Amino acid sequence: MNTSSEQARRDKRQYITFHSGEQEFGADIMTIREIRGWTQTTPLPHAPDYVCGVINLRGMVLPVIDLKSRLGGTPTEVSAKNVIIVVRCGEQSMGMLVDAVSDILTARETDIQVTPELARDGQSEFIDGIAVLEERMVAILNVSRLAAMLTGTRAVSLAA
């Protein structure tokens, strides 16, 4: 009896949901460290277009990526309404520029469907699936893969 309630708890996960462009995304709540208002970034030379730059977060230099641009959309026109979601995966921390944070979503594994193979430019590698709840569809972001991508990009930039 105790085992089935533990299993049910493990099957449910919580996600912070947010908008970037016309799409709604979710990120595992355990990877989110902070949600902060837009802060001007310092650009990095030779960084890819989707890297906004870096900010100083309590003495730590934090890279910030434009999520919409990274997933193949047009770069975000930044305003005071934008938000930076600070995520941490293992030893890597980064900020994701998004339009707005929505809410907390609780979903079971059975609520998440496989991502269709229609995503272009390798976008689907950053999406674990689509949560389908009532009339809402939320793309579940794989923050670990995004963070790993950033680490790889930084290593290349330093070597150049």
Image: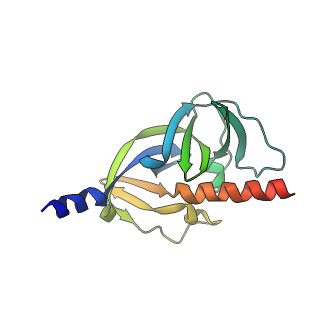
Q: Nearer the viewer, residue 59 or 33?
A: 59
Instruction: Give the mark count.
Output: 0
Q: Residue at x 55, y 32 (%)?
A: 36
For the N terminus, the image quarter is bottom left
Residue 123 point in image, percent of width and height: 59, 62
Q: Nearer the viewer, residue 18 or 156?
A: 156
As drawn, the residue found furthest toward the bottom would be 117
For residue 133, above or below residue 100: below
Q: Residue at x 67, y 49 (%)?
A: 74
The image quarter in which residue 143 lies: bottom right
As drawn, the residue found furthest toward the top would be 80
Residue 95 point in image, percent of width and height: 61, 42
The image quarter in which residue 81 lies: top right
Q: Residue at x 71, y 39 (%)?
A: 54
For residue 73, above or below residue 52: below
User: As drawn, is 118 to the left or to the right of 151?
Assistant: left
For the C terminus, the image quarter is bottom right
Q: Residue at x 84, y 45 (%)?
A: 45
As drawn, the residue found furthest toward the left would be 1
Q: Nearer the viewer, residue 19 or 4?
A: 4
As drawn, the residue found furthest toward the right would be 160
Q: Nearer the viewer, residue 74 or 85?
A: 85
User: As drawn, is 11 to the left or to the right of 17?
Assistant: left
Residue 40 point in image, percent of width and height: 70, 30
